[in-house]
Amino acid sequence: MSSLPPGLDFAKTEEDICAKWAADDTFKTQDKLSLERGDEEFTFYDGPPFATGLPHYGHILAGTIKDVVTRYAVMSGKHVERRAGWDCHGLPVEYEIDQQLNITHRDQVLEMGIDKYNDTCRSIVTRYTKEWERTVNRLGRWIDFENDYKTMDPTFMESVWWVFKQLFEKDLVYQGYKVMPYSTACGTPLSNFEAGLNYKDVRDPAVVVSFPVVGEEGVSFVAWTTTPWTLPSNLALCVHPEMEYVKLLDKKSGNTYYLAKNRMPQLYPIMNNKKKWKPAKMADDLYEIKETLKGKDLVGKAYEPLFPFFASTPESKQYFRVISDTYVTDDAGTGIVHQAPAFGEDDYRVCLAHGIIIKGGDIPCPVDANGMFTDPIEPVKGKHVKEADNTLIALLKDAGRLVQKDNLDHSYPYCWRSDTPLIYKAVPSWFVKVEEIRDKIVANNQKTYWVPNHVKEVRFHNWLTDARDWAVSRNRFWGTPIPIWASESFDEIVCIGSIDELAELSGIRVDDLHREVVDEVTIPSKKNPGTVLKRVDEVFDCWFESGSMPYAQKHYPFENKEKFESGFPADFIAEGLDQTRGWFYTLMVLSTALFDKPAFQNLIVNGLVLAGDGKKMSKRLKNYPDPNLVIGKYGADALRMYLINSPVVRAESLKFQESGVLGVVKEVFLPWYNAFRFFIQNVERLEASGTKFIPSVDKVKATTNPTDIWISAATQGLIKFVHQEMKAYRLYTVMPALVKFVTQLTNWYVRLNRDRLKGMEGGDAETGLQVLYDVLLGVTMVMAPFTPFITEFFYQHLRKMQPSYKDAENGGGVSNPVMPGKSDSIHFLKLPQYDESRLNEDAVEAMEALQTVVELGRNVREKRNIGLRTPIKSVSAVLRNPTENVVAAITGPLKHYILSELNAWDFQVVPKEAEHDWVTMSLQPNFEILGRKLGKKMKAVQAAVKAMSHEEAVACLQAGELVVDDVTIDAKTELISKLSFSKEGDHWEATPNADGSVVVAVDCTQDEAILSAGKSRELINAIQQLRKNAGLDLSDQVEVFFEEEEGVTSVEDAVAGNLPLFETKFKGAIPVPKRFAPSYRVVLKNDVVDVGGSNVEVSICRPSIAAKDSMDELVVTFLSTLDISDVSAGQELSCSVDGKSHSLKEGQDFWLNTASKVRATKAVSWLS
């Protein structure tokens, strides 16, 4: 085992581990070992991403969550199939190809040929799979790319056909004519949940238009709309049957209008300004109300059409009249809604109900698949609907029908793929009857467990309860064709569920199910012999494919039938919050329709990763750092921990900050590594002294050191907590606990035991190292699923100390049974289970008290500006209701740690009976609780509580209640108590903790003894810094010399007054004045440092023999050549110089070091 470098390049180390994992097939070996053991299956579904783009932080986050959970499952004794999948079909691919080939109309694809178009699509779907694989592997995520699935695989597509046929046979499929969100850029309808994926704030024209009433000269209905382009298709006007409407004369124009009474401010905006609107003075100047009536009184009235385009059709005799429905509101517009049934969901429904249009009949829809106006709308023919608004508004103005023109800023749906505004358009589609099974879907959702739960209970539940029938067809080309073959009149329909069934009915066997192949296949009609059934034109929405993923990835039910059914529903899935209306929804709909079960049991929902400014991450704006650069800079473990230790794992948003990733390195990994390196160094030191280090849990359990007992208890508590929380899928509670533990280990345990572990406190070093090894191995193993790289690095060093390490030879490291040492990777191991016998609440509680006292004591020092090297006389702590265990521990076995950490000479816990001399107890009401309970009595209670003396407050807490004006108040939950320092004397300084339960007071008296001890500490620190700069090891012996400015002896006085401190710290090598240093000394390092305000030159030198002052110079030269390791105390030497023999004895003629010589010769009074 070799010493570790002072600094570890985490990213480079990870790259080396990645390469080793790849070379050794470590992931495959983990899976093989699990299968060999027959581990219970844990089913995980990985939602397929599109490989047409590179992975971003959203993918990295979801991938990290999935990897943590599945690694945890494997290390908990489960077998997890982790199979990568790719979404290959649908809009994301087609849109990119359309951009590439400059395709703007569906007819261009037909001219090109569907086969060529689909071949082009196929060529890009796996374009970035290698980049994905590289990033995912570098992230430390283990997933099988070799055995991946693709939604374009014939096996996958065949299972999708099977799913659809099951729905078809259950009468859950129908073809309908429905107004749907429609992407004109992609030429296809979208489902409602797709329409909800991308809302933007936009400004649209808002116009009020007049519709002259037939038979009422000079009278018009007025309607408001933000979609002027729909006005050429107007067929009716809708009012609310019970709403009040007015017929009013507009004084300015002389026109008479019908509109809702509550919506008059639409025509007269000043009515919205309550301060300026004076109806008594102003109303008569603006309007005159001629009549007030209900909406139902207007029903049936005819009006003149806005445009003539549909005024002369055979169906027009039903058009252009007033109808009613309760969907009309009075919160905007005029209370009269213009109806264009081809472009509005409610419009279609209401017009159908009132006979304006008939089911199955034609609807005026003068807009083509790409959103361009067609015949008969000649003025804007060939224009996109959104570009036609201004032309149409101008026509209305010229015709005298434009009453008002304004703009409206509002939120509007955009296509999630092309980022263009959606329209609503009536299109024929194939639907799944979601509404028919909605209650079952809602019930199945209740059988699932979500983290966080509120997303399930609120967001997802609300979405399910309002779920509409799902349009699963798309009028596109690159997708799984809908497997329906029908006659021209649709009186004969066949739904195909497999390749075999298609071959049986058509006589043609195919091996590809894409349109260019199956569109050519016809099925002979059974109903009309001599004719054939042809496949319908549509393909499946890609969401239908991803919702079919649980079945299709396994080619169910054609293969893996038993394996699938035994593992369904899945144990676990995870994706982002946006998937509540996407993948989570489609999974739930299809699993309910097929099996009346949820598709999954447990789900983690993550929030969105935003740019640092809170905006959406944008490649165009470059407002976020490249993930690969961040990983290359700080390492994947740091990025993983940053992400899963953030609000984003609670489905909240995270504003990504690169500094946060750096923070993980600085605050967690560097201290953890330093503690690990410190351990390795001291094991090497122990073994260099002749003691072989062999890990022993028995030695750990036998320790009596209180900090050993505490850190062991904390480790077992952590292991217990991780298992408890991971079983509940609460990553957001696990990571903070792991981070806190690493801080406890590095900042407290190692710090408090540094000298002991170095062997500077006698023979207890091995016990401390045994404990530290046990803790490091335990925490390394339990953190392995979270930070797979650094834990692997630590394990590869720790395993070499295990007796079983030798069993790794000849394939033992990759075989069962797995065990620390023998196993070649930490990821082969099972996670440790907590040891009940080592849990110790008393030890943990006592250590928490110690830490509170130390932290408050440091705070006091800062307040008085007393450096830590200057001792303080005494520290006193007042603890509110401490347990006997805590007091006994911090005044007993833990006391010397407090004294050491605070550099104090004494410490006490103030006894209960003396507390009133030190602190004042005060109470105040818990307003959050009592405010609701007391109401108006709150003031009286507050006054009574604030007026209580210290003794009364203590008595109240002991009694557990307080009665004020016949109101009983619970002292524990409804009152807040605080301690404040009240002892007199300027030499006292005190600080309470945040909740006022602990006060620490320090006697800040600075006398000569205190100042002298402070200077000694400063000198010790200077010596240690020189040793460090010289690259010395702890075992390396040196001599120390110091020289003060002329006439100054403050440092010499400090050394003289604190000899025991120096003797303990430097094993007897006491610093001595430079005037006693031999001329032949070898200086290793020297520096001028500030000690107590004086400049002092401090030198560390290689140990050398110190000769008697009167000795012959040539003999001294001889002695200077000796290595002190060759000379022992009391040894006699003989030498011959210039023919003269000399007999020399250590302790009389020379000494092993200068300090011994000064002591023996009594050269200074303080060293004798």
Image (cartoon, rainbow, N blue to C red):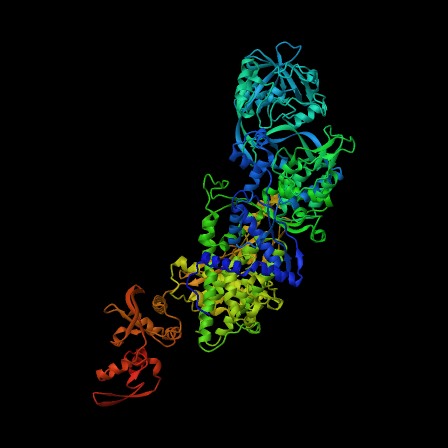
Q: Please, is residue 659 above or below residue 819 in the view?
A: above
Quadrant of residue 492 within the rendered picture? top right
Q: Position of residue 517 (x, y in %)?
A: 65, 38
Residue 975 shows in the view: no
**Residue 939 seen from this side:** yes
Depth order, front residue of 667/541: 541
Query: Quadrant where the C terminus lies?
Result: bottom left
Name the residue: 44% across, 75% down.
Answer: 688
- Residue 147 versus residue 1051: which sits nearer the camera? 147
- Above or below, 542 relative to 659: above
Q: Is residue 678 left or right of residue 86?
A: left
Asked which quadrant contains residue 78, the reply is bottom right
Nearest the viewer among 371 and 267 is 371
- Vertically, is 1155 above or below 1143? above
699 on left or right of 859? right
Name the residue nearer the viewer: 481 or 891: 481
Q: Quadrant of residue 526?
A: top right
Asked if residue 183 is positioned above or below residue 30 in the image, the reply reads: above
Residue 794 horizontal/vertical position (percent): 50, 64
